[in-house]
Amino acid sequence: MLTFSMIIMFGLPPLTFYAVMGAFALVLIVLALWGLRFQEVS
Amino acid sequence: MADMLTIALLGIYFLMLLGIGSWASKKIHSTSDYIVAGRSLGFWVFTILVVCSICSGMTLLGVAGFGFSSGWPGIWEQIFVPLAAAFCIIVFGVKLHHVGRDRGYLTVQDYFAHRFESPAAMRGMSAVAGIIVSVIYLVGQYTAISIVLAWLFAIQHWQALLIAGVIITAYTVIGGLYAVSWTTLVQGIILIIGVLLMAPMVIIKAGGLTHVSQVLASVDPNFVQPWYPSPAYAAYAYATPEFLISFGLLLTIGLACAPHVINNVLAAREARYFQWAPLVAFAIYGVVMFLVKFAGFSVRALVEEGAVVMPEVPNAADFAFVTGVEFAMPNMVIWALFAVIVLAAVMSTTDRLILTIGTMFAWDVYKNIFRPQAPDKEVLLVSKVAVVFAAGGTLLLAVNPPALLAWLIWMGIGVMLSTFAVPLLAGLYWKGATTKGAIASMALGLVSAGVFGYWHQFVAKLPVHFSLYALTVSAVAMIVVSLLTQKNDAAILDETKTGWFIQPR
């Protein structure tokens, strides 16, 4: 928590949010590259 | 505030929307053209339609307002809401689009009726719940429009409503989803460019994000934390970890299954769009909403430093973005543009809501329940008449908005989550979900959303968002009743591509 406040104070972006945002974006990129191939098996 | 330039720019904007509506009306030959734009939407029209159906004027004003009053802990909203677009396209969209094309679905209710072999009960209940939720939402949208127009032109609330209502209704009635989707593309581009231009100006004028955060921290150190400590110690400090979890579920899944959002997946032209559309929608929406939120922070910092004064109205926080732009850019040209941007955001959701209400009534209630033998031309006509009634009726409600409008809007999203999420998810992914399970889940979800929503507002505050309790009731009802009742026909499960996979073969 302290680190988080310090990061903001010293002018870096609030990493918690960007990290979560980036993690979701990464999941979506992986899903897209994978072609959403979570496929039905016959 | 109004000047000739603003009026001229708004006039051009309105004429452009009507022009698109007129062009779109020539493409409407059947109910399918009207409701799902003949399943013809290209990648960008489809993706921007999903984003802008979710992103409304309330979003634009409310996001900055929430940032203004609650600081950084509220920014999770800007992750959850864009995620709703991605969730909708991946988890619901891929399969619904595939089956919808094969089976000719026009609304999600077609899916419910087919998957759960329930042409009357499931279709009727989900259509009525969808119409109620959309009407509540629409009244909120109209109120947001009138806030902007009344303030810009110093006109009466009802006059502002009438101007916006007539324009939106005109192009939606004549052009159906063709008009709604293409006007939304224009509105979306205006909104994105506008926010990219204006929000950074507000942040810079407030001294940059670092300075803004320092000022916020001096007001309340928790303003720059990821969440507020539990239990909430002030009215603005409700974003506690447990609340944020329920808030995340509510926004991500609740908005994804909102009728005016999910029905868009039936209108995409090609299945391959579903591969990259989730990421593109998430990224565009995320960037725009982060910037609007930062603008809200900046205005709070400016107010704390005495640089600007908020208007003395009960919902002052909702004016944060407007106040920030007024301070940062007193230029007339930008002002005119700002009016168009907020209107674009509001109108892109409003038109989709009006169309959704009208088509759910005409297709699901009129055609599929009361008059199955009605010819296509008659259904098309009923759709148009229902759109006019939906617009007119909600306009009347918005002239005298209910005192608890904000509560009603949150109720609306909560009802969407509690009513639609479980039957949709279980229907698409669990072969064991049965007709009776779905009916029990939807009915109990709806009733318990009302009960818990009422309890939270009028009896005692609940630690997490009320919809989480209702969602749990709905899920338990689905599992228990499904396990006790007879499974649906294997052929139907096969036709509706039911099972634990996203991509049908």
Image: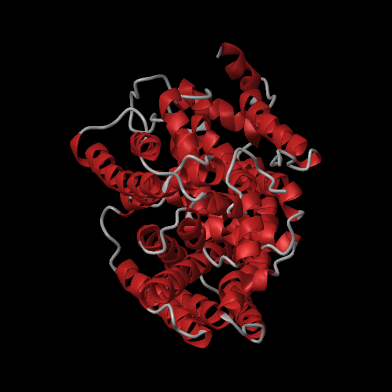
Q: In terms of depth relative to the viewer, which is nearer, B361 or A7?
A: B361
Image: B215 above or below B382: above
Question: As drawn, which residue projects farthest toward the left?
Answer: B459
Query: Could you say which quadrant of the image residue A4 lies in?
Result: top right
Q: In terms of depth relative to the viewer, which is nearer, B194 or B413?
A: B413
Query: Which percent across, then down, holds residue B53?
Result: 56, 58
Q: Residue at x 47, y 86 (%)?
A: B378
Q: How many marks?
A: 0
Query: Which percent across, then down, holds residue B42?
Result: 74, 64
Image: B358 above or below B218: below
Looking at the image, residue B93 sits to the left or right of residue B304; the answer is: right
Q: Residue at x 52, y 62 (%)?
A: B349
Looking at the image, residue B144 sits to the left or right of residue B470; the answer is: right
Query: Could you say which quadrant of the image residue B386 lies in?
Result: bottom left
Q: Is residue B461 visible?
A: yes
Q: Residue at x 47, y 81 (%)?
A: B379
Q: In terms of depth relative to the viewer, which is nearer, B473 or B142?
A: B473
Q: In terms of depth relative to the viewer, which is nearer, B145 or B87?
A: B87
Q: Residue at x 69, y 45 (%)?
A: B503
Question: As drawn, which residue projects farthest toward the right?
Answer: A33
Query: Could you say which quadrant of the image residue B365 lies in?
Result: bottom left
Q: Is residue B304 visible?
A: no
Query: Which percent across, then down, holds residue B283?
Result: 70, 44
Query: Which percent across, then down, holds residue B374?
Result: 45, 83
Q: What scheme was used to colour the molecule? A: secondary structure
